[in-house]
Image (cartoon, grey):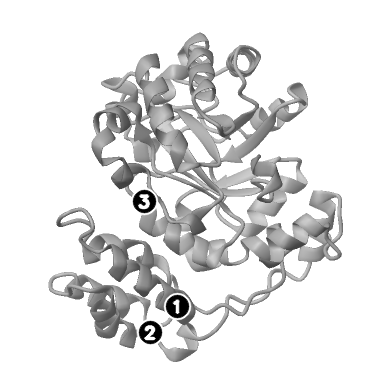
């Protein structure tokens, strides 16, 4: 079981289309050992119709555990087939997308957040997925859709899905979705956050586990949410746009692990080996640009960041290896930035960790020591 192998998902990185791919997840795991990572959403039909090329969509490096596969779809047969095909890859959880407001998904595709209007189907889908998987299952959803946005309607969705399927974990994006008239980007910021809905779920469904998502962008905010009782916190674009500082304190400030002296230079040395090993693995893909994309936020707000990005943009035009890409671009970044560790977590992290988890930092149990110090 997952619980025997990994620490709980107190912190996770949200599934983001065209962002949380294999390359990003490899980088994220170099920085944080304990953050839970999610794949991009994969449509069940993609898995089923590409079953001759499954590694391209489902394979990942073993270091990426704990990792969650997010599936989307509205056809029970395809969801069953897709989950069965994915099962041998050994994901640590299978998550069903009931939160994406994209017109391609919720509109033409008739899945994503639109499924919140049909909890009976979602329960059936979760039962089918669970039956075909060795991993636990979860649902990621919003707090409502269009005018179906009352707390009672959210409770009805949670109750029906949890009582009619094995689903015990819900990731709640604390905004409703508007299906007509605004873009997916606007759907991430225009509907107001209603954290009170999330915390009410904790009260009203004490036997379920809820992760909060939406508007939380720093480790301080993560721990503030957990102090309020959140079982887990999911962070989205901040973990991509500023991975060094967002992920760099996760293990210490959230999981209580020993401080690390890891530097960006060490991360890049390991990433270079990985990157050059995967270039062109699938014909012309991935390219140097594809592999280097997750690195573009690594020097967020640091001296030389602007020049580094300009050099990177030029290097994408002709570099054929990650090694040559680094040789051409990293001169923009001062050695002091490359060689400084992420630094200590906030000074009160020990008290925070103790208060949140009901335990003190070391000594840990034998299993916790194995995980934290591995």
Q: Position of residue 273 (x, y in %)?
A: 36, 73
In percent of width and height, residue 254 lies at 69, 57
Q: Which residue is mark 1?
A: 302
Q: Give the SS element for disc 1.
A: loop
Task: Name which residue lies at 24% across and 64% down.
Answer: 279
- Closer mark to the observer between disc 2 and disc 3: 3
Crowdedness near tag 1: few (<14), some (14–19) or many (≥20) residues, C-alpha within 10 Å: few
Disc with the residue nearer the chain's start (2 vs 3): 3
Viewer-closest of 10 and 89: 89
Q: Quadrant of residue 162?
A: top right
Q: Where is residue 185? Give x, y as percent.
A: 36, 41
- Examine the rendered structure and indicate whether residue 188 appears above or below residue 307: above
| Rendered image: mark on residue 19 | 3
Kindly identify which residue carries mark 2: 333
- 238 relative to 230 in the view: left or right: left
The quarter of the rendered structure image containing the C terminus is bottom right
Label 1 and label 3: CA atoms lie apart by 22 Å
Disc 2 versus disc 3: distance between alpha carbons? 24 Å
């Amino acid at each position: 079981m997952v619980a025997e192998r990994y620490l709980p998902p107190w912190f996770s990185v949200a599934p983001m289309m065209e962002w949380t791919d294999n390359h990003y997840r490899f980088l994220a795991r170099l920085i944080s050992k304990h953050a839970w990572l999610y794949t991009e959403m994969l449509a069940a039909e993609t898995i089923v119709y590409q079953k001759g090329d499954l590694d391209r969509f489902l394979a990942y490096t073993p270091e990426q555990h704990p990792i969650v596969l997010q599936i989307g779809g509205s056809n029970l047969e395809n969801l069953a087939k897709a989950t069965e095909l994915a099962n041998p890859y050994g994901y640590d959880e299978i998550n069903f997308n009931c939160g994406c407001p994209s017109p391609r998904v919720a509109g033409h595709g008739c899945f994503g957040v639109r499924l919140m209007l049909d909890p009976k189907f979602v329960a059936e889908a979760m039962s089918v997925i669970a039956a075909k998987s060795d991993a636990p299952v979860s649902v990621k959803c919003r707090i409502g859709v269009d005018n179906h946005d009352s707390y009672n309607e959210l409770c009805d969705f949670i109750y029906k899905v949890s009582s009619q399927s094995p689903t015990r974990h819900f990731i709640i994006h604390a905004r409703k979705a508007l299906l007509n008239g605004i873009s997916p980007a606007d759907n991430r910021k225009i509907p107001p956050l209603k954290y009170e809905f999330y915390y009410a779920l904790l009260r009203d469904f004490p036997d379920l586990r809820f992760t909060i998502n939406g508007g939380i962008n720093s480790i301080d905010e993560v721990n503030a949410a957990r102090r309020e009782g959140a079982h887990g916190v999911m962070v989205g674009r901040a973990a991509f746009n500023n991975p060094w500082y967002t992920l760099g304190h996760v293990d210490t400030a959230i999981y209580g692990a020993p401080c690390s002296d890891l530097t960006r230079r060490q991360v890049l040395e390991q990433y270079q080996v990985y990157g050059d090993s995967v270039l062109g693995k699938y014909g012309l893909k991935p390219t140097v640009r594809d592999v280097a994309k997750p690195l573009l936020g690594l020097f967020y707000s640091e001296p030389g960041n602007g020049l580094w990005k300009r050099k990177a943009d030029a290097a994408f035009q002709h570099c054929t290896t990650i090694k040559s890409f680094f040789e051409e671009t990293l001169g923009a970044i001062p050695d002091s930035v490359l060689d400084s560790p992420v630094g200590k977590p906030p000074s009160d992290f020990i008290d925070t960790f103790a208060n949140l988890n009901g335990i003190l930092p070391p000594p840990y149990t034998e299993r916790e020591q194995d995980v934290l110090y591995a």
